[in-house]
Image (cartoon, rainbow, N blue to C red):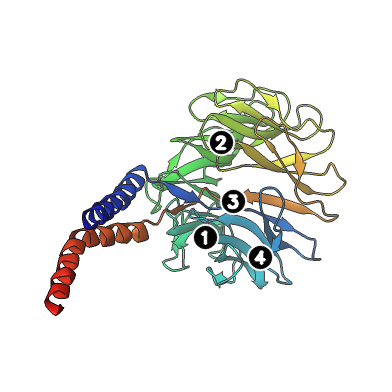
Amino acid sequence: MTDILRVCLLLYGLLCLLTVGVVSAARIRQPQPAWIAFETERDGNHELYRMRPDGSKLENITNHPNFDGSVRWSPDGAWIAFQTDRDGGREIYKMRADGSNVQNLTRHRGDDGAFQWSPDGKWLVFQSNRGGNWDVYRMRSDGSAVQNLTENPAVDHSPRWSPDGQWILFESNRDGNLEIYRMRADGSAVQNLTQYPALETGSHWAGDSILFISNREGNWDIFHLDHGNLSLNPGDDGDPQLSPDGEWILFNSNRAGNREIYRMRVDGSEVQNLTRSPTWDAGPDWSPDGRWIVFVTDRDGDHEIYRARADGSEVQNLTRNATWDTGPRWSPPVDLPWRGEAVWLSGLFFLIQGFVFPSNAATAKTGSSTSR
């Protein structure tokens, strides 16, 4: 019986250790439930709420009498940066995703806005008029190390980090008309990317390239820096949003006579009207897995937040409130690491027991014989 027990202990210990090794190698992780944060006036002032992607578990996460808006999730989903005037001017704050631990990051009398987290979550870039005109600044995620990156007498605004965190897009009229520029994350190596006498704005990264809108052909079209005009339509198209897999572009357009949400392939093909409603639909945002979109619509008589499949099917009203709900932003894809410490320790314990048990049993047997 002792040998059988010893073998069982050894096998169980090895199995535990093997499980930890396989799980660690496969990097199995536990997904964190997603949220959608948004702006609302349902409490009589502009507040931030969050809800689950099906509209459940609605929570007020600001609960303050002043204006709170412009949700920006941190890359790890733990924090939300937002804009508020609770200290007088428009400042940038951050808080935990549940609304706790609220912190003023900018602490300046100027207006600060159009902010975005760096991909690693260590920095925020933003625009501010604290120096007498609009410039692009960056700061640490705790509000320290504030730096003016543009320092130009022109208007510089709307900064956006590149996916690798090495570059920042921004828009400027420093060459006489509104153009799109990029610079290194420290403000160096400034380049005019568009160099065209028309207006270029609404820029978004598309991998190493960019999407933007321009009126260079007489109306607002969506352009790809490397592939030219993607929308080629007499209507006005705007707000291009690249899908997480880089295959599709969401955008809004009035080409059908009212504002609707469309998608197309990154080369401009397969254009589809996703909303097909006689009312106003705009402000889309992709889910992290690219399978859903959320958007704002007035089809129920006020601004509501809806979600739909990426192909426009399974449309659902998430907010169902008589006041305005707008600005939905899906929380980023966040995985909680699988914790294997307990399994590892359990395996080690049983391995030790498997080796020690026979000697303990033998000792016990010897002791028993001696006592007799």
Instruction: Please provide percent x and percent y for residue 348.
Output: 26, 59
Q: How many residues crowd mark 4 within 10 Å: few (<14), some (14–19), many (20+)?
A: some
Instruction: Please provide percent x and percent y for residue 65.
Output: 74, 72
Asked whether, in this view, residue 350 is left or right of residue 212, the answer is: left
Q: What element carries label 2?
A: strand
Residue indicated by mark 3: 34
Quadrant in the picture for residue 22: top left
Q: How far apart are marks 2 and 3 (CA)?
A: 20 Å
Q: Looking at numbered disc 4 in the image, what kind of residue is underneath it?
A: Ile
Of residues 16 and 160, the one drawn nearer to the viewer in this rendering: 16
Question: Sequence-wise, which precedes: disc 3 or disc 4?
Answer: 3
Q: Can residue 35 be spotted in the picture? A: yes
Quadrant in the picture for residue 104: bottom right
Question: Sequence-wise, which precedes: disc 3 or disc 1?
Answer: 3
Q: How many residues crowd mark 3 within 10 Å: few (<14), some (14–19), many (20+)?
A: some
Residue indicated by mark 4: 61
The N terminus appears in which quarter of the rendering? bottom left
Of residues 134 and 308, the one drawn nearer to the viewer in this rendering: 308
Q: How many residues crowd mark 1 within 10 Å: few (<14), some (14–19), many (20+)?
A: some
Residue drawn at the location 70% of the way across and 71% of the way down? 64
Q: Looking at numbered disc 1 in the image, what kind of residue is underneath it?
A: Ala
Of residues 33 and 160, the one drawn nearer to the viewer in this rendering: 33
Residue indicated by mark 2: 242
How many labels, in total? Answer: 4
Residue indicated by mark 1: 78
Mark 3 and mark 1 residues within 8 Å of each other at the beta carbon: no
Between tags 3 and 4, which lies in front?
3
